[in-house]
């Protein structure tokens, strides 16, 4: 079973962010099913976890639905993340949620990066904000980021948006096919030589 987790950080309901998340999910699911995968989709609606996120940042202990959401993210075979754009960057609530993801748990995770905004002027948010964040988390974003302005939904940019969605879905399926067995996180600065071997070397 292929586990696909979708993180949607829209602040309103309904929202264009959730609409884009759903379209990316449908395209990715269809691509994976066409390749013979059985797909389980889990959706994390960050807006619904806002109070729990604040509590967890203050106490350091995510609980309840928030703990489940974080587990859904770190145990997935692939991620789709979508955030609205504010001040030329990702939403603060989205960043607060990602701040609760334990370090190292997204290493090697295939992910589609996506964002929504009022105009095309903010399209570089994916390259300037989202991609550096997930590089720091050691995830593996696909090459195609998907940005959708308001005019892309049913307007002149609709066909181009559909093409980007399809391309990103295919890239995620390709990347995930080679990453189903991910390396367990480890301390890169730890001495991995067994202690018994060190003793043996010392007595030789």
Image (spheres, grey):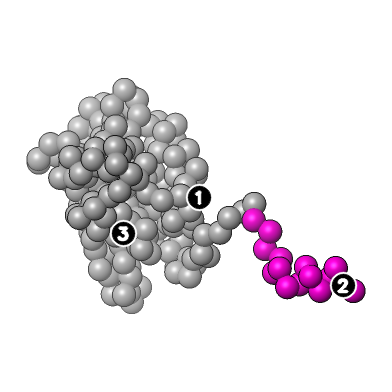
Query: In this image, 141 relative to 169: left or right?
Result: right
User: Tag 1's secondary structure?
Assistant: loop
Main SS category, magenta section:
helix
Q: Nearer the viewer, mark 1 or mark 3?
A: 3
Q: Nearer the viewer, residue 71 or 170?
A: 71
User: Tag 3's secondary structure?
Assistant: helix
Q: Nearer the viewer, mark 2 or mark 1?
A: 2
Which region shows up in magenta?
190-204
**Mark sitting on residue 71:** 3
Q: Residue furthest right?
A: 204
Q: Nearer the viewer, residue 123 or 41?
A: 41
Residue 143: give x, y in percent of width and height: 46, 48
Label 2 crowd (10 A; few <14 / some 14-19 / many >=20): few
Q: Nearer the viewer, residue 83 or 185?
A: 185
Q: Residue at x 19, y 48 (%)?
A: 45
Whichever of labels 2 and 3 marks the residue nearer the N terminus, that label is 3
Label 1 crowd (10 A; few <14 / some 14-19 / many >=20): some
| Residue to which mark 1 is pinned | 138
Alpha carbon of mark 2 to alpha carbon of mark 3: how far? 46 Å
Q: Nearer the viewer, mark 2 or mark 3?
A: 2
> Residue 71: which quarter of the image?
bottom left
Q: Judge whether 9 appears above or below 1 on screen.
A: above
Q: Is residue 115 magenta?
A: no
Residue 64: give x, y in percent of width and height: 20, 55
User: Is the Cβ of the residue at disc 2 closer than 8 Å to that at disc 1?
Assistant: no
| Residue to which mark 2 is pinned | 203
Label 3 crowd (10 A; few <14 / some 14-19 / many >=20): some
Q: Residue at x 20, y 44 (%)?
A: 52
Residue 140: give x, y in percent of width and height: 47, 52
């Amino acid at each position: 079973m292929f586990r696909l987790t979708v993180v949607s950080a829209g602040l309103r309901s309904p929202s264009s962010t959730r609409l884009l998340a759903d379209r990316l999910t449908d395209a990715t699911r269809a691509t994976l099913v066409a390749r013979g995968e059985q797909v389980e989709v889990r959706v994390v609606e960050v807006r619904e976890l806002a109070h729990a996120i604040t509590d967890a940042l203050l106490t350091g202990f995510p609980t309840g639905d928030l703990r489940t959401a974080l587990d859904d993210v770190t145990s997935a075979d692939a991620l789709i993340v979508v955030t609205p754009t504010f001040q030329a960057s990702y939403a603060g609530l989205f960043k607060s949620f990602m701040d609760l993801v334990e370090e190292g748990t997204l290493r090697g995770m295939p992910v589609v990066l996506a964002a929504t905004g009022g105009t095309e002027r903010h399209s570089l948010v994916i390259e300037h904000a989202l991609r550096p964040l997930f590089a720091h988390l050691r995830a593996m974003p696909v090459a195609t980021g998907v940005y959708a302005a308001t005019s892309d939904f049913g307007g002149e940019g609709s066909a181009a948006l559909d093409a980007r969605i399809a391309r990103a879905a295919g890239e995620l399926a390709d990347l995930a096919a080679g990453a189903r067995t991910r390396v367990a996180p480890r301390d890169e600065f730890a001495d991995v030589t067994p202690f018994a071997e060190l003793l043996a070397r010392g007595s030789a």
